Amino acid sequence: MDKRYDVYCLADRYFYDLPDQKATAEDLEKLSFPAGSTELPTGWRKFAKEDWTVCNPPEQQLPMQGWKIHVSAHGGNADSVLEAVYDYCLPREISFKYLSGRHVLRNRNLKYSDRGSSGKFITLYPLDERILRTTLEELGVELDGQQGPYILSDLRWGNGPLYVRYGGFIERHCISDTGALVGAIEDDRGTLVPDRRDPVFHVPAWVSVPEFLMPHIEARKDGTTDDIAYTVERAVHFSNGGGLYEARHRENGRKVILKEARPHAGLTMDSADAVERLQHEREILERLKGIEGVPELIDYFEWGGHHFLVQEFIEGETLSKTFALRYPLNERATSAAEAARYTRWALDVSRQIEATVAQIHGRGIVFGDLHPFNILVGEDGRVSLIDYEVSSDAAEGAKPSLVNPAFAAPADRVGFDHDHYALGCLRLSLFMPLTTLLRHDFGKAHHFTEQIRQVFSLPDGYLEEAVERITGTGRTPTSASAPPARTALDRIPRITADPADWAHLRDALGRAILHSATPARDDRLFPGDIEQFHTGALNLAHGAAGVLLALADAGVDYPQEYGTWLAHRALAPRPQDRLGLYDGMHGVAHTLLRLGDEDSARELVALCLKEKWELLGTDLKGGLAGIGLNLLAFSRRTGDTEYLQAALHAAELIGERLGTVGSVATTSGGGRPYAGLMRGSSGPALFFLRLYESTGDTAALALSRKALEQDLRRCVTRDNGMMQVNEGWRTMPYLATGSVGIGLVLDQYLRHDRDDRLVAASDAIAEAASSQFYVQSDLFNGRAGIILYLAERDRTRPSERSRGDLDRQLGLLNLHALSYGDGLAFPGEMLMRLSMDLATGNAGVLTALAVALGRNHPGLPLLTAAPSATPERPAAFPARTAGRR
């Protein structure tokens, strides 16, 4: 689970949005800090920037980078801390910024917020090291005694709330080793390098630490765990609230689990910190002592200001991991024997969990956070429940403050009914793990049971009782959150492989998209993924460009004002708007050109080419490969050779950076460059392939092959014959970062260079598109991307097997289908909210179905070519980069 999504669920029940999007001016006023209304001296500038309020003195030129000061605070003292900083900085003309409201401060310190930025309430920018020292010494006295979350990325000054870190003052960017665009600082050679913001203090190798900071660095080394009774052997997990560690008692050698809690950090939405919850968990475990399947409480102590709970170590894996290894629908087919074997195991697990929960209820306790990550399964099959920090006394009627969205009960459930709902979801999810969708429509529970029965033979009443627990059948609802009628799902069309159904499906998908539009907003036109709030809501992947192009290509009419909205916003870009094809302005320009607004499109490309685009990575999503593809398209469409020359320059840069086949690791991600279509070498492979088709230069074809072989190096063929991208701890089949995205390019390459080894790889990748189950429905990381790949393969390398897989995947897409705005809708990433964008939502599903069922659809922007694509004409291509292998 990606916990970043939780906070974007607060504002709207249907779509991801900014937490304060629907807050009124009055609401924001109540959440603001009183010191923020302080009148600034003449000439000072005060402005909002994302979550921050920035205050700059007149005519001050900040250095590009240096030692900055961070001030920590918690909800109880933030007012007085900010007031002290205002009083100190204004007369001394020190630039500073602070989080703009109490809600932002809380959200930055939530349990699953970024650990590297947690605790940073205020940032000061001293002009030099003399001012740095004076500020630390004087402001340190002013704030003596104030507390806040420990800032993990910084060096603490004394025992107060001041911290320091060397980093960027002015926003600059570079490409990291993994190919991501990240904040940058300049090294001693003048090269931009990543400005590391890891949750550990780090000083760049070329930076000299001021002498007055050395005692504080030495103080960091003074802390030792020798004076506690346990030796830590391994860190199991980290959250913003603290760590979870495997350890041993120094004297008796007993293996235990240490659970750490950091004060003022790891908040829940009720603002309880990790220490408060750990103390509560201690009390719960004391009440549950002696229940089999509940870990024994061994010890509780405080060290270094942090609290530690010591509990019994239970051997086993989480149910989520055990399930993933056993679930038979991950395969192409499931035999009756395999289904029966799995069913016996799943029923035994379910029985044990329900028995343990019943014993917990017998002590008057609501478990509160029941889900597969909090359930351990031992090698002997015995089940245990872990993590009791949000458990509660049933008599209190408390709502759990931390929940898993796939198992979280609706608001009208109280007491033991929280667990009863989760147990119902658990019964279903052991056979169809899509219970997150129930928060959209409880009618999906009936749909899932129908699908489950097609494969698994279950005892009478097993599924019916689960549905009753979920839907609340027979209960008297206590609020307006009672489950909606099942009829909402009955109104949406069923997806089939019959092309005759295409127009009906297209219109239903289009109605939902258009119903979601918000042209009155200037930050986004269509709701999509949370990435809209980080890289902008204009681009192809997550923004208006991708949605409008999908609608136009599918033949769905939309108001003309939507195109005007896109052009107007694009020609006045904002800081978060990027340059790339799928994450930025080149994609917007491509869309405007395709929609007939050539003037705006050319103007936008001109703006892009004035930026330092050559410094971007080589990938398709946001780098040179995508930009090169767009420039080639502009050259063909407009006849302007300047675009072709810029594309050739991009090709030369990529060729210089590509390296050899063996220069990439054998795994994707995990601190290494990613494989795949959007972030891996398949993007450059596609660009070089298009260059070959445009220029006839075989050097481009050779580079295309080399890039493809780099990505194939990072794939692994599983025992079931499926070739997937190897991420070390899992394998991925999907379009954006998995193997079918590589296969999409590989199949096009094979038109020009048929090689037996590459053909075998292509066939093994096709096998990865045959699973019965995919967690998500979307284009980049879900079933829609599988469908698009199979549909394109049916064009390039048709076979009865692939066509049969395509027909089956079309039918299985109904598992995720939902109703919205009298239309057909699909959930976005994490399934918690709907999405309308191309990468994660309706626009992507619309595109996939259009390719599979429609006629003459162009496919994904710039990723597919007509089956007859052949080299057109020779041109000057920089061939000197093609020789290395």
Image: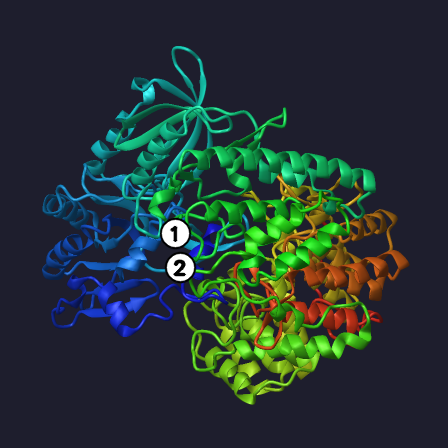
Say left or right for 128 vs 878. Answer: left
Q: Which residue is the site of mark 1?
A: 186
The answer to whether residue 568 is above or below residue 633 is below
Q: Point out which mark residue 858 bears.
A: none
Residue furthest toward the top?
Answer: 251
In the picture, residue 335 is in which quadrant?
Answer: top right
Say left or right for 518 vs 553. Answer: left
Q: In this orientation, does residue 686 appear?
A: yes
The answer to whether the residues at label 2 and label 1 have Cβ atoms under 8 Å apart is yes
Q: Where's residue 739, x and y in %?
A: 71, 51
Q: Name the residue nearer the viewer: 390 or 30.
A: 390
Question: How many numbered callouts?
Answer: 2
In the picture, residue 445 is in which quadrant?
Answer: bottom right
Few, some or many C-alpha atoms within 10 Å of disc 1 (few <14, some 14-19, many ≥20)? some
Q: How far apart, in angstroms, are the residues tagged by discs 2 and 1?
A: 9 Å
Tell me the element at label 2. Answer: loop
Which residue is drawn at the image coordinates 78% and 65% (left, top)? 792
Q: Where's residue 799, x and y in %?
A: 89, 59
Q: Amino acid at mark 1?
A: Glu
Q: Name the residue nearer the viewer: 447 or 191.
A: 447
Q: Nearer the viewer's eye, disc 2 or disc 1?
A: 2
Which residue is drawn at the image coordinates 54% and 49% (left, top)? 178
Q: Where's residue 132, x and y in %?
A: 19, 48
Q: Name the residue nearer the viewer: 568 or 103.
A: 103
Q: Which residue is the site of mark 2?
A: 172
Few, some or many C-alpha atoms within 10 Å of disc 2 (few <14, some 14-19, many ≥20)? some
Pick whichever of labels 2 and 1 is earlier in the sequence. Answer: 2
Tell me the element at label 1. Answer: strand
The answer to whether residue 516 is above or below residue 580 is below
In the picture, residue 624 is in which quadrant?
Answer: bottom right
Q: Amino acid at mark 2?
A: Arg
Q: In this orientation, does residue 636 appear?
A: no
